[in-house]
Amino acid sequence: WHMAWSGFAPIKSDALQFYPWPGETLKLEVSRPAAVAGAQQTVESIKLGSRPGSRAAIHALDIDLRASSAGDYRVQLPQGAKIEKIAADGQVLNTEDDRNVVLPVHPGMQKLQIEWREAKNLGLRWRSPAIVLAGPASNISLQVTLPQDRWLLWVTGRGGNGEGSNAAAMGPA
């Protein structure tokens, strides 16, 4: 909020204290500042945990989201996803659509969770699921837990196929 005054100056400018003399008039104008353009929701961090198996893969998506106003946050899961659990700040929610998930958002910081199963076997080559978020995200982490009888032989990033400039360089582990 913003306040402007006219009539006479305050006695203390840091605390805005006014002591009018008899006959003096103080006029105060209080106004709400205009909203600043920008995103109303910010993904502070996102973590995707995947456990591929011989018949299916189980995924858990954890989103730390900060919002300046109430609304919805939309996440699109891969085709064929079967939702097992949806929660917002620990409160379990229901959904009718296993692919397009709409999560309620309140002002402030919150934790959103989606767990789903995908009928996708491990095979010789496995990719993490393609997830579409409602906007940009930062602090993204991916954790893949392989069965004990499997070894990791090759890793690429950014959707790269391990060939050409599309493959992301992976640093030392």
Image (spheres, rainbow, N blue to C red):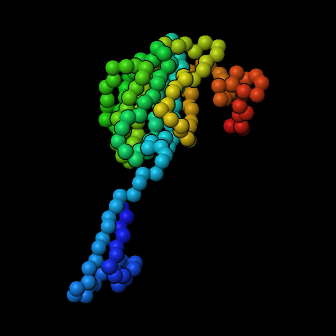
Residue at the outermost bottom position: 21
In the depicted view, which residue is nearer to us: 39 or 59? 39
Image quadrant for the C terminus? top right
Q: Nearer the viewer, residue 99 or 45?
A: 99
Work out which quarter of the rendered image holds the N terminus and state it.
Answer: bottom left
Q: Is residue 88 visible?
A: no
Residue 89, quarter of the rendered image = top left
x, y percent for residue 149: 60, 18
Which of the two residues, 7 or 15, is positioned nearer the viewer here?
7
Tell me where residue 112 appears, x and y as whole percent.
41, 36
Toward the viewer: 124 or 39?
A: 39
- In the picture, measured across the screen, residue 63 lies left or right of residue 155, that is left
Residue 40 x, y percent position in the rendering = 44, 44
- Work out whether residue 71 can be spotted: yes
Q: Residue at x 38, y 34 (%)?
A: 72
Residue with the most extreme right position: 164
Whether residue 31 is situated above or below residue 5 in the rendered picture: above
Work out whether 90 lies above or below 124. Answer: below
State the residue at coordinates (56%, 36%). 141
